[in-house]
């Protein structure tokens, strides 16, 4: 990569934004917070994976998916299934009528591990499943919808229906999925206790590094030709098609990418929080993830991370002190962001904070230069 | 799964489940009619439609309490007044929402979806604050209680029959309004070609507002009818919204006939399967089939040709 390529991939302003975010996530937060709060931030950051994926899908591609919780959940469940099998050793589950299987299966009179649980005995297979299962699922939905030129609100409604179907399915089949409680009581990863404070620190940093990997990939997509095609598609789909591009393939790709990001987030959620349940799969969580992205700015991948942090932080502190006000605040947030700030925090920064910093920086530099000018120096003969 | 039952039993199971399905069908149709008008005619996704319906249900609840408190003699007739008030209250709220919110977002349909979702959250919390988190039910007047025995196994509840009759009347009224009245003509003209409709002197903004208010008003009536067959809670609307959207999309967004046909198919499939499978699996299967068909035929069952 030549210097010029690097500059095209990461202009100075983006570089600063990345660096600031890195300082916030890797230095400021861990220094300022105890492990309980840091673990909470780590949980919020797992939603940021979804929000970053939504920036590409929705902000760039114009595809609004109201079912991202499906992919977040699938990734999380793949991870949780591995952890559950590991903690369900015959010794640990000796009191069950069938030792060696997860406790909820035992409660539901299931006596052997179902076939689709078998691959999750192995960590490599489970990690591959975290990425592959949601991506293939997204690919199937994407091919079925985009090849037939279904988009816009129809796509939004159908993804919402998919989220609803998956939630009902998970809750209904509790013998295989843990039902409404989800898969709980996850303790170790290859013998490593994930509930200890040191493990939480390690997982927080792993989560941050993975998030930055996704952010860099998203940045690459944004700055590549693909990003331009996505934008063009969002604006005038027909013209892009007439120019000879197969629009549906680009849409399928970006939808799958968003799904893969979400799945990584889901898996990291399971590791950091220690359980996975259908309450992160359904309609309500999925549409909340869209609002994280909208608050941050639907065109800004870095903004999406801040948006996720701000909304979740507000949610936690609101629901602690005024639980009944939270839904009002959330509703107002949806309406306000859409009607008054369609470009979110990133737009506020770009239009108000950014120019202010730029101006102060210039003024500072000017006064510094004036100071350095030889004729300003007091000289005595 | 059929082998455990005799033919006569199977028939009466289908008849009973079919009737339960008809009640579900009526609620679907009433909700979907309002949604189909708003979505089909205006292209606006109203995620708060369920909450408009619940508003109608709460209005009915209030009025039934009012009657039993002050006018017990007239209690048997409260429902008719409640329905009319519900229609106008939700319609007025709808007109206000259109004026304050929706009209600024016509160019951005996906954003309307998010904004109306926000509205639905606010309405839900309002209901919770005002009426409490617990579900409330109305007491039915005497003439709506009981059931009509058809054979010795099959019994038909009267409130179900009443809701079905109501659905029929409202559907016919909506049909007449949309296809035989001047207002309907204007609405359809605006849908088919907005600039031309404006050019021939139709006030398109006013038409939009009335259409939206009408859709919401019908949701209010749906809520009124809903109190006859179930109890009302702050989040009851959300339970139905995805199903109703699928009904509208499945039927073909611009077609009222399609909406009714798809409401019929979905509700019958769901309630018949519910008897043999668990409720949740019946719902999963129904929704899966609908989504599957929509993938093959995205324009829905009955599609109207429109020039964009």
Image (tube, coloured by chain):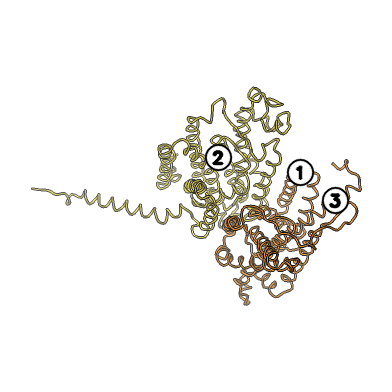
Chain colours: A yellow, B orange
Disc 3 with disc 2 on a shared chain: no
Q: For marks 1 and 3, give the CA distance.
A: 16 Å
Asked whether residue A236 is in view, the answer is no
In the displayed structure, does residue A342 sit left or right of residue B65? left
Report which residue position mark 2 lands on: A265
Earlier residue among tags 1 and 3? 3
Query: Which SS class for mark 1?
Result: loop
Q: Is residue A353 left or right of residue A309?
A: left
| B155 relative to B42 in the view: left or right | right
Number of residues whose C-alpha sits closer than 10 Å to that of mark 2, classed few (under 14), some (14–19) or many (20 or more): many
Residue placed furthest toward the bottom: B201
Q: Residue furthest left?
A: A381
At a point 64% along the width and 39% down the height, the residue shown is: A181
- Discs 3/2, front: 3
Residue B59, percent from left and from top: 66, 63
The picture places residue A278, in percent across and down from the top left corner, at: 63, 42
Q: Mark 3 — residue?
A: B14
């Amino acid at each position: 990569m030549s210097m010029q390529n690097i500059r095209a991939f990461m202009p100075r302003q983006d570089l600063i934004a990345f660096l600031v975010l890195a300082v916030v996530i890797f230095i400021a937060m861990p220094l300022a917070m105890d492990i309980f709060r840091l673990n909470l931030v780590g949980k919020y950051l797992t939603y940021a994976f979804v929000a970053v994926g939504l920036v590409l899908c929705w902000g760039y591609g114009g595809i609004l998916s109201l079912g991202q919780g499906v992919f977040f959940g699938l990734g999380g469940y793949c991870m949780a299934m591995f952890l559950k099998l590991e903690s369900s050793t015959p010794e640990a589950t000796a009191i069950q009528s069938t030792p060696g299987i997860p406790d909820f299966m035992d409660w539901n009179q299931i006596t052997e591990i179902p076939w689709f649980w078998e691959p999750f005995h192995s960590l490599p297979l489970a990690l591959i499943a975290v990425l592959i299962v949601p991506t293939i699922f997204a690919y199937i939905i994407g091919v079925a919808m985009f090849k037939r030129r279904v988009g816009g609100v129809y796509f939004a409604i159908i993804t919402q229906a998919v989220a609803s179907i998956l939630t009902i399915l998970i809750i209904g089949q509790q013998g295989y999925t843990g039902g409404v409680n989800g898969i709980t009581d996850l303790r170790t990863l290859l013998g490593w206790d994930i509930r200890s404070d040191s493990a939480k620190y390690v997982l927080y940093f792993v989560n941050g590094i993975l998030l930055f990997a996704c952010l860099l990939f998203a940045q690459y997509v944004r700055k590549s030709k693909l990003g331009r095609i996505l934008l063009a598609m969002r604006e005038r789909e027909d013209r892009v098609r007439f120019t000879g591009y197969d629009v549906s393939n680009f849409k399928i790709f970006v939808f799958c990418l968003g799904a893969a990001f979400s799945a990584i987030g889901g898996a990291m959620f399971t590791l950091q929080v220690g359980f996975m349940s259908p309450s992160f799969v359904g309609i309500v969580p999925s549409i909340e993830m869209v609002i994280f992205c909208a608050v941050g700015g639907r065109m800004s991948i870095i903004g999406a991370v801040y948006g996720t942090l701000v909304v979740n932080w507000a949610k936690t502190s609101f629901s602690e002190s005024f639980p009944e006000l939270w839904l009002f605040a959330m509703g107002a947030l949806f309406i306000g962001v859409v009607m008054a700030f369609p470009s979110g925090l990133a737009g506020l920064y770009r239009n108000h904070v950014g120019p202010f910093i730029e101006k102060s920086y210039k003024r500072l530099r000017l006064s510094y230069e004036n100071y350095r000018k030889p004729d300003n120096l007091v000289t005595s003969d | 799964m059929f082998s455990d039952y005799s033919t006569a039993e199977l028939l009466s199971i289908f008849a009973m489940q079919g009737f339960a399905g008809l009640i579900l069908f009526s609620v679907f149709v009433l909700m979907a009619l309002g949604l189909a008008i708003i979505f089909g005619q205006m292209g606006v996704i109203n995620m708060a439609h369920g909450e408009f319906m619940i508003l109608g249900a709460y209005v009915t609840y209030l009025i039934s309490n009012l009657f039993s408190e002050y006018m017990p003699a007239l209690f048997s007739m409260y429902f008719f007044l409640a329905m009319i008030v519900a229609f106008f209250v939700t319609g007025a709220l709808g007109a206000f929402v259109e004026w304050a919110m929706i009209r600024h977002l016509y160019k951005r349909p996906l954003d309307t979806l998010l904004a109306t979702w926000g509205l639905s959250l606010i309405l839900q919390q309002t209901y919770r604050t005002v009426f409490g988190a617990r579900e409330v039910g109305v007491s039915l007047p005497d003439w709506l209680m009981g059931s009509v025995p058809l054979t010795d196994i099959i019994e038909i509840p009267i409130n179900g029959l009443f809701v079905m009759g109501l659905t029929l009347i409202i559907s016919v009224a909506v049909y007449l309004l949309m296809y035989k009245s001047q207002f309907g003509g204007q609405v359809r003209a605006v849908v088919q070609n907005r600039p031309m409709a404006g050019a021939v002197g139709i006030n398109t903004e006013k038409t939009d507002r009335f259409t939206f208010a009408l859709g919401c008003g019908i949701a209010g009536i749906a809520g009124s009818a809903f109190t006859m067959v179930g109890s009302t809670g702050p989040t009851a609307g959300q339970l139905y919204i995805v199903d109703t959207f699928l009904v509208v999309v499945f039927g073909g967004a611009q077609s009222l006939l399609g909406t009714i046909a798809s409401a019929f198919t979905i509700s019958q499939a769901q309630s018949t399967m519910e008897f043999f499978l668990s409720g949740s699996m019946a719902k999963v299967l129904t929704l899966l089939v609908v989504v599957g068909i929509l993938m093959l035929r995205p324009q829905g069952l009955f599609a109207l040709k429109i020039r964009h």
